[in-house]
Image (spheres, rainbow, N blue to C red):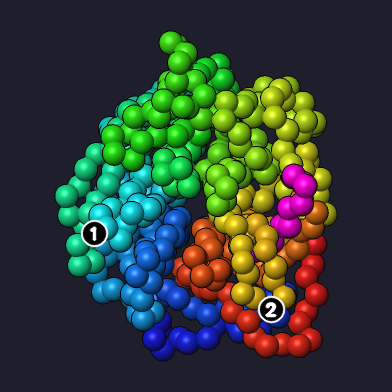
Amino acid sequence: MGIAGLGMLACAEGEEGEKFAFGLGAEAVATGGVADNVSAIDFAPDGRIFYAEQFKGTIRIINADGTPQAEPLTQIVVADWLGQDWGLTGLALDPEFEDNHYVYAFYTEFVETVTVTDEAGASQEHDIGQPKLVRFTEVDGRAEDTTMISEDFPETDEEKPGYNANGEIHFGPDGYLYVSLGDYDVFGKTPEIIQDLGSPIGKLLRIDKEDGSAPDDNPFADEADADPRVFAYGFREPFPFTIDAEGNVYGSDNTTVSCEELNVIAPGKNYGWPELGAFPYSDCELGPGEQAIHRFSREGMEPSEFVSFVEVSGLSFLSGSSYALLSDSLIICESQKSGDKPSTGVLRRLVIADGAVSSSEVIVNACRGETRVAPDGTVYYATTNDILKLVDTGDAEAQAPSP
């Protein structure tokens, strides 16, 4: 069933028959095979919605009237390793899109396949990838004039295929492009590189949108041995992040098994990874540097417990909310939740007051991938094969939110 035939989907209930909180329901925006593992969503000033399919490498468009554009804007040949972290992970429209129609994409490019022999003498073939940041010009719904903005990122480690490379890209209100890069999963092999300011690995970068260069006012721009693009450092998976209208950066990170956190990411600050002591990291506050303002965990678990992480895959600010019962908050997509069944994930809202999270409630148990708030305040979110948007149902006896 295509978008036009689907209409309202789950207007009172989420997956597994669970009701939405805050008097909300969901309306299908993209479904029927054109929203596979959606990793990024952005909005054009003319009302169109652009979104990225991570492993297919496609950038697709939903027209202003809600109909899907038949052909994608473009399809990038991306590296994927067993559906892990690689692929097309970042998408951003230029703040001046109305004039220049620039679309930016952050993805993993295949480099080569190598044969790796372990200590026991067993051999396996592994792929090597490299993050790339490109720009397209959108002309009548198609991509033209491909421009390489930056390919100055290290290749992934031959022993760590598929993990923790390119993350998201977002524009700040300062007009610069912010770029998240993971730790390449090398914390057990070369942990020093994550704290090394000379490497972009495990960092949040701030760059010029024209050529990928570092702005002069970046925090380490004047340090001879530093990569001048570095904005903040000490991360494992700083992939989902968002920037509010005042330029405050909020992002998530976690260890391999626990201590998933929400950070306020400030220029020049160190967020501690991988200096958390001995595995399995029983104390989430053990690392040096900045501490989280909130820590996530699965239902019935503490953040420090083994495999407690929820795998935050998207976050975005809801400001000037038009929903009757859902107020301004940080909207979170958690791709995992407790239980024995395959996870449908969780869409959650966090209320932040005085630099701390004052409340946390589940909107519905269904979210895997991106969530993004449109300029008009509408909340969009992805499941494995759909994009949906939250709508008011007019339910005067709305279900109370759960923690």
Mark before the other along the chain sequence, 2 or 1: 1
Point out which mark residue 138 bears.
Answer: 1
Rendered residue at 39%/86% (across/down): 4
Circle 2: element type: loop
Rendered residue at 34%/29% (across/down): 213
Q: Quadrant of the C terminus?
A: bottom right
Q: Which one is in front, 15 or 90?
A: 90
Measure the alpha-carbon separation of dots 2 and 1: 36 Å
Q: Which one is in front, 355 or 191?
A: 355
Circle 1: element type: strand
Residue that mark 2 sits on: 324
In the figure, 61 relative to 291: above or below?
below
Inspect this view and state whether residue 157 appears: no
Please report the bounds of the magenta region as a residue range.
347-356
Left or right: 335 in relation to 182 = right
Q: Position of residue 221 (x, y in %)?
A: 45, 20
Magenta stretch: dominant SS? Answer: strand
Find out whether residue 332 is within the magenta segment.
Answer: no
Q: Amino acid at mark 1?
A: Glu
Residue lying farthest to the top in this orientation = 224
Rendered residue at 37%/64% (across/down): 44
